[in-house]
Amino acid sequence: MRTVVQRVSRASVTVEGRISGAIERGLLVLLGVGQDDAESEAEYLAEKIAGLRIFEDENEKMNLSVVDVGGAVLAVSQFTLYGDVRKGKRPSFDAAARPERAKELYEYFVAQIRAKGLRCETGVFQAMMHVELVNDGPVTILLDSKKEF
């Protein structure tokens, strides 16, 4: 699994003109599921993301997690994180999981985030979504469950 984690002061997802998920202070997580991913990757990333110390403490040091600051998570599925453009200019998505499996693992990831006591809003799987955010910092972190980066 791959994620782009952004510290936000607010974020929302709109599908067909309706807001499907919105948060104030917290993390926007764009989540891509790979062909070989399993529940263990979702568990690893949920644990890592819930504990990421990327919020500032009273000394303006990144030392607090989203849990520590009482923030929320907006999780949005994004298979394009597996786009491979090493050859040519058109991305190949061969490494992305099939939609049925990707949805299952995306929902499992959301459940894992919620199990950590975090409010987790979501987009709509496989829908055309409009994501709006105010990146706070900006702070953007890339995570890969296989630790490829």
Image (cartoon, rainbow, N blue to C red):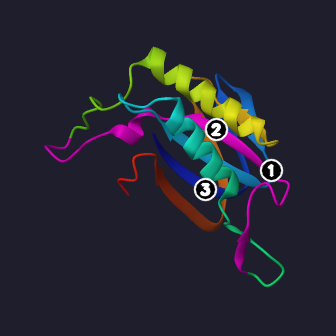
Residue 75: mark in rendering: 2
Residue 12: mark in rendering: none
Q: What stretch is highlighted in magenta?
A: 61-89
Where in the figure is residue 142, as x and y percent of width and height? 48, 56
Which circle's residue, 1 or 3, is located before the other in the chain? Answer: 3
Separation of marks 1 and 2 at Cα, in angstroms? 13 Å
Amino acid beneath label 2: Ala
Residue 24: mark in rendering: 1
Where in the figure is residue 53, as x and y percent of width and height? 68, 66
SS label for mark 3: strand
Q: Residue at x 59, y 38 (%)?
A: 43
Which circle's residue, 3 or 2, is located before the other in the chain? Answer: 3
Amino acid beneath label 1: Glu
Q: Is residue 100 left or right of residue 149?
A: right
Residue 85 lies in the magenta-colored region: yes
Q: Which residue lies furthest to the left in this view?
A: 87
Q: In this view, does 6 lie to the left or right of 35?
A: right
SS label for mark 1: loop
Q: Quadrant of the N terminus?
A: top left
Residue 6: mark in rendering: 3
